[in-house]
């Protein structure tokens, strides 16, 4: 019998709907950490938007967990993508919880399990597990024929010889997470997923994107380097329709209560200083930030952690960009890794614009979250020549900052183009996100003034 998915009651403007609970059939198990490298393979075309059972054209219905739609009720244009956002937020809440468990397990073990140099690109069981979980949930909620997903990880590295233990850990992690689905208002599988189903869920994320149709974009763990170091990371999900990002959700499981701790390097701090780290209440605060295009609002929910009393809908609150427009008072964020963005170029830029504060170097799309929450005013990224930015590293963050009142463009002042496939094709030099137009103009002008003398 179909069970209504929490989607349409719209009791509050940002979270809505009712949920029905079912009993978990699974026993959570603890899974250790693994670590591999990734590449890209096996992508297929996205689904034209007209093939999607849409609820946005003035009617919408109850979504069943079998992916069917029932009862039609009036639906104003303003309700567009509410159902998708609702499911996406719940799925990302679940993914945050999954990542917290895996990260704890990774950093509580000796680092011999993590074999990587700083300049390599890591992938862990969390990356694959989140990808499988979110893919499975979206397919379950909307029907697999209606869901097209582009995501970072592929199935090759965990299905090849010698990775049986890794795959087993991913399957366990996915099942443990999906068993919790009812607590988040979603429905998990009736039976424990087998290896084949988990691999299918991962490999289904093979959309190549493009300028027509609708597809989801998922970065299952963004800032994997931060993740394995016990530091900041994000889970990013966006929906793109005809080349435009229509909703974005960012899970930031380690976003600290005090913004000053954003630049706190958990592992190094523990090892080197032997000082007491912030309590888990403050360090592990965590949040999910989300926005729908055109709503003019971005929202933030606390994480629904295991030991907290579960309430849904829970206390989301609106977030807004900072009103600071004086460069001397502004904080700018950038990637931690010099290899990912030129620190020397941004140092010069900061000086010429009159930025006085130390840069806030944070892993992952948490930088976009920091701008949207008003904890920083500027984010700049200037990758080395030849590096092509992938759309999953930016789509959710761009939508959220824009709805929170900020601006995101390339260094030529043009909007980022999410319609050209996996990459942000045609990106002019770098990415600049700001809380307002005044700071944005200053940075753009400063880039022009210093670009030719830079070595980028
Ligand atoms: N060489 C190079 N240049 C530029 N960008 C790169 C490069 N290599 C990787 N990446 C992408 O950067 C994503 C992480 O970005 P961050 O801003 O978090 O960088 S940093 O980790 O703080 O240094 C990271 O995302 P994840 O792979 O999801 O962690 C990559 O997609
Ligand atoms: Mg990666
Ligand atoms: Mg990423
Ligand atoms: Mg990633």
Image: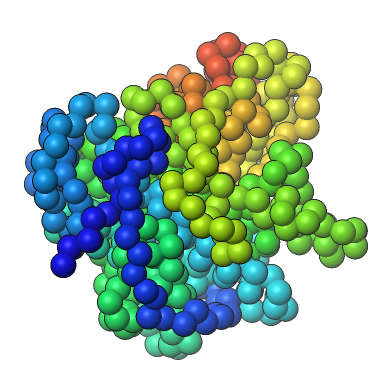
In the displayed structure, 100 sits above or below 335; it is below
Residue 102 in view: yes
Image location of residue 446, percent across then percent down: 61, 16
In this picture, residue 42 sits left or right of residue 428: left
Query: Quarter-wise, where is residue 140 in the image?
Result: bottom left
Quadrant in which the N terminus appears: bottom left
Q: Residue at x 44, y 84 (%)?
A: 168
Query: Quarter-wise, where is residue 290 in the image?
Result: top left
| Furthest residue in direction right, as rendered | 274
Say which of 316 and 199 sits in front. Answer: 316
In the displayed structure, 124 sits above or below 91; it is below
Image location of residue 416, percent across then percent down: 39, 30
Q: Residue at x 53, y 34 (%)?
A: 317
Query: Quarter-wise, where is residue 211 in the image?
Result: top left
Quadrant in which the C terminus appears: top right
Q: Residue at x 82, y 57 (%)?
A: 277
Please tell me how many numbered marks the rendered image carries.
0
Q: Residue at x 49, y 53 (%)?
A: 311
In this picture, residue 195 sits left or right of residue 389: left
Image location of residue 43, percent across then percent down: 25, 59
């Amino acid at each position: 019998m179909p069970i209504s998915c929490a989607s349409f009651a719209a009791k509050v403007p940002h979270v809505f709907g009712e949920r029905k609970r079912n009993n978990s059939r699974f026993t959570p198990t603890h899974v250790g950490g693994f670590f591999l490298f990734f590449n890209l393979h096996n992508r297929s075309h996205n689904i034209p938007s007209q093939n999607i059972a849409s609820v946005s054209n003035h009617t919408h219905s109850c979504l069943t967990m079998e992916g069917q739609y029932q009862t039609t009720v009036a639906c104003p244009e303003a309700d567009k993508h509410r159902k998708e956002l609702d499911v996406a937020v719940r799925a990302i809440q679940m993914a945050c919880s999954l990542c917290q468990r895996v990260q704890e397990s990774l950093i509580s073990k000796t680092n011999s399990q993590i074999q990587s140099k700083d300049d390599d690109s890591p992938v862990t069981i969390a990356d694959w597990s989140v990808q499988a979980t979110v893919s499975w949930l979206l397919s379950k909620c909307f029907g697999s024929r209606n869901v097209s997903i582009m995501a970072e990880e592929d199935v090759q590295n965990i299905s090849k010889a010698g990775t049986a233990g890794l795959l087993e850990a991913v399957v366990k992690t996915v099942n443990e997470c999906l068993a919790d689905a009812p607590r988040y208002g979603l429905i998990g599988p009736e039976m424990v997923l087998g290896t084949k189903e988990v691999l299918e869920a991962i490999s289904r994320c093979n959309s190549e994107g493009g300028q027509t149709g609708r597809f989801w974009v998922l970065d299952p763990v963004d800032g994997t380097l931060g993740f394995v170091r016990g530091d900041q990371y994000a889970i990013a999900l966006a929906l793109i329709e005809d080349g435009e990002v229509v909703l974005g959700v960012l899970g930031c499981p380690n976003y600290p209560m005090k913004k000053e701790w954003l630049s706190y390097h958990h592992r190094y701090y523990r090892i080197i200083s032997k000082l007491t780290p912030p309590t888990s209440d403050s360090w592990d605060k965590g949040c999910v930030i989300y926005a729908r295009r055109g709503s003019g609002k971005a929202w933030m929910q606390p994480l629904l952690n295991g030991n907290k009393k579960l309430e849904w809908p829970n206390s989301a609150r609106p977030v807004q960009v900072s009103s600071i427009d004086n460069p001397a008072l502004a904080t700018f964020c950038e990637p931690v890794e010099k290899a990912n963005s030129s620190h020397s170029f941004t140092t010069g830029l900061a000086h010429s614009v009159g930025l006085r504060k130390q840069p806030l170097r944070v892993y992952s799309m948490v930088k976009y979250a920091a701008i949207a929450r008003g904890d920083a005013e500027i984010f700049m990224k200037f990758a080395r020549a030849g590096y092509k930015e992938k759309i999953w590293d930016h789509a959710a963050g761009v939508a959220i900052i824009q709805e929170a009142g900020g601006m995101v463009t390339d260094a030529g002042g043009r909007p980022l183009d999410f319609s050209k496939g996996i990459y942000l094709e045609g990106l002019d030099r770098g990415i600049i996100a700001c809380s307002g137009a005044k700071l944005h103009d200053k940075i753009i002008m400063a880039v022009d003034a210093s670009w030719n003398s830079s070595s980028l």
